[in-house]
Amino acid sequence: MTDAGEAIRFERVTKRFGGTVAVDGLDISIRQGEFFSLLGPSGCGKTTTLRMVAGFEQPSEGRIFLEGEPVETVPPYHRNVNTVFQSYALFEHLDVSENVAFGLKRRKVDGDEVRRRVKEALELVQLTGREHSKPRELSGGQKQRVALARALVNKPAVLLLDEPLGALDLKLRKQMQVELKGIQREVGITFLYVTHDQEEALAMSDRIAVMDAGEVQQCGTPEEVYERPEGTFVAGFIGISNLLPGPDGSQISVRPEKIWLGELQDGMTVYNGKVVERVYVGTTTQVIVELDSGVRLVALEQNTARARSDDRWEIGDRVRLGWHPEHALVLR
Amino acid sequence: MSAAAPAPGPKEFDRPRFLRVFTALFFVFLFAPIALVALFSFNSTRSLQNFKGFSFQWYERFFENESLRDSLIASLQIAFVTMVVATALGTLLAFGLVRARTRWAGSANVLMLIPLVTPEIVAAVSALILFTQIGMQLSLATVMIAHITFSISYVTVVIRARLAAVNPEVEQAALDLGATRWGTLRLVTLPELFPAILASALLIFALSFDDFVISFFTTGESPQPLPVRIYSAIRFGVTPTINAIGTLMLAFSAFLIGLAIVMPRLLGRRESGLGVLIGRDTA
């Protein structure tokens, strides 16, 4: 099957809670097999959007189509989607295999098939051997895997993930990002992934919709939203952005890694300033420069093997910095 | 023997020794009278002061006494019916109070507490007045109705707390996985509440079984609930038969508490029913 159809389509979807608008005129189409992320700060409407797909909330206006069919009259238990909840939401009174089998049993799948698919799902998330553990005996990462297996075992049209890695520590989160991406590629199920972590969204997604105040600010591949942010919100929310006043009330955005310090090349946009702070963050050091106009910019100094401690920018140094014009984006 | 001196433990300056004495005295005062009651129930003579020898005669007397036996059976019936009906109604009320999205929920939550603070004598007299006003013959049925009425609040208080603590995402997960609303209640919500339901059921059984005041006012002539029957009996002098009854009741209550602790564990639960009752969630 080469023709990738449409998994979800939002048509002018608006959700109001009382007087507040949580989601405002959402228009997105998600392809089958896509890893699609909704990225934004808390309160931007991303979780509400997810819950409308799951069926826990109804849109105030607009329609949602799942595999081409409108879903507003379909209750959650008849929708061909499954959710991985932020709190995992495991059934504490059931063991791991009973948790994973829960959805299949509701669909009256026969016993041998249930056993076979539960076994497969637990293999997929590397929990073979923990079939009879109770959720309370598992670590956070293991609970996460059970929640994932419990949803994936039903082979839904779309898997909905609500900040599933939010409760894990940094190292485990990084590891699970890689694993989740691998699992998604293996099973080929459409993932709709909600997160406020821009690095996570960039690392895993095929496409990202950046949301703010209920509206999609930009929708595109990780590279598009990072390299060519449309508007100051996206530029500021994804990665570090340096904003300078541009012509006609516009703003100019330059990424820190695009700024050169000291030795410049021909054709660069050049400014003069003074180093006011150094922030050591491991692989790089952020050098904060205050321009003569008073604007502060962040540039990066690589902490590579070649870097020497006597050859670096110190606080108080006067510095010339610049960038190639194609790396400066005009935002309106 | 190790040559190294044992490492000094943490200093106990924050745990004064008199607290141990105090705790010990507390348990002596608590259990000594009960222990004496149990001891003299096995006395071979009628005396409640001198223990002469061991015998089961007072237990035999109790079981031979038809009227006492009928009272025991009546009390067990009352407690059982009260337990089943009050636990069911109280659980439903807890669902209503926690889940109903109405502005009356706040008032209902307060009103529900009133039976807990009403003096029992007031509840008893008002029940009696109600039954006579509507021309209801006093019997075991009237005792049951009165017991159920005062028991519902206890059930609701215990279950409401537990229900409010149920993670809404767990119920949504069940819906998400294809369970209907009824299926979610049966397969997820009620199992989550099970320790609380069991604990309140046992609490209600114990409260109803040894209730005196309300039973006294709302019972008919015969058979009377056991506590009322015992009260009539001691007006003609205390015999060790009373001790035997007391000891049996004590053993039975201990059995119920044991059940409350063991049952959830047998079913693979983290917490015991008793833990729920005394407010300790993870025993």
Image (cartoon, helix red, strand yellow):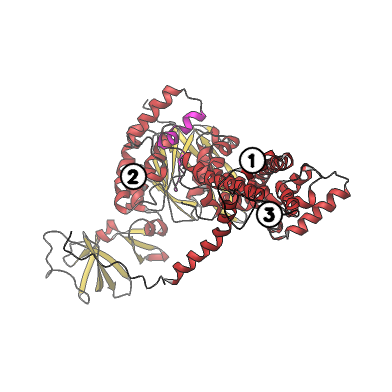
Circle 1: element type: helix
Residue A238, picture quadrant: bottom left
Q: Which residue is mark 1?
A: B60
Q: Which residue is mark 2?
A: A204
Mark 3 or 2, which is nearer the eye? 3
Residue A228 visible: no
Q: Do labels 2 and 1 touch, CB within 8 Å?
A: no
**Structural distance between the alpha carbons of marks 3 and 1:** 53 Å
B122 lies above or below A291: above
Circle 2: element type: helix
Q: Tell me, for residue B105, which label it has, or none.
A: 3
Residue range of the region highlighted in magenta in the rendering: A83-107
Residue A51 as seen in the image, left or right of residue B223: left
Q: Position of residue B115 (x, y in %)?
A: 71, 56
Crowding at label 1, few (<14), some or many (≥20) Cα neighbours within 10 Å? Answer: few
Residue B181 visible: yes
| Closer-to-camera residue (B266/A66) | B266
Residue B41 as seen in the image, left or right of residue A88: right
Circle 3: element type: helix
Q: Position of residue B104 (x, y in %)?
A: 71, 55
Q: Amino acid at mark 3?
A: Ala
| Closer-to-camera residue (B261/B152) | B261
**Structural distance between the alpha carbons of marks 3 and 2:** 45 Å
Chain for disc number 1? B
Mark 2 or 1, which is nearer the eye? 1
Q: Quadrant of the N terminus of chain B?
A: bottom left
Q: Amino acid at mark 1?
A: Glu
| Closer-to-camera residue (B138/B10) | B138
**Structural distance between the alpha carbons of marks 2 and 1:** 78 Å
Chain for disc number 3? B
Crowding at label 2, few (<14), some or many (≥20) Cα neighbours within 10 Å? Answer: many
Q: Position of residue A258 (x, y in %)?
A: 25, 59
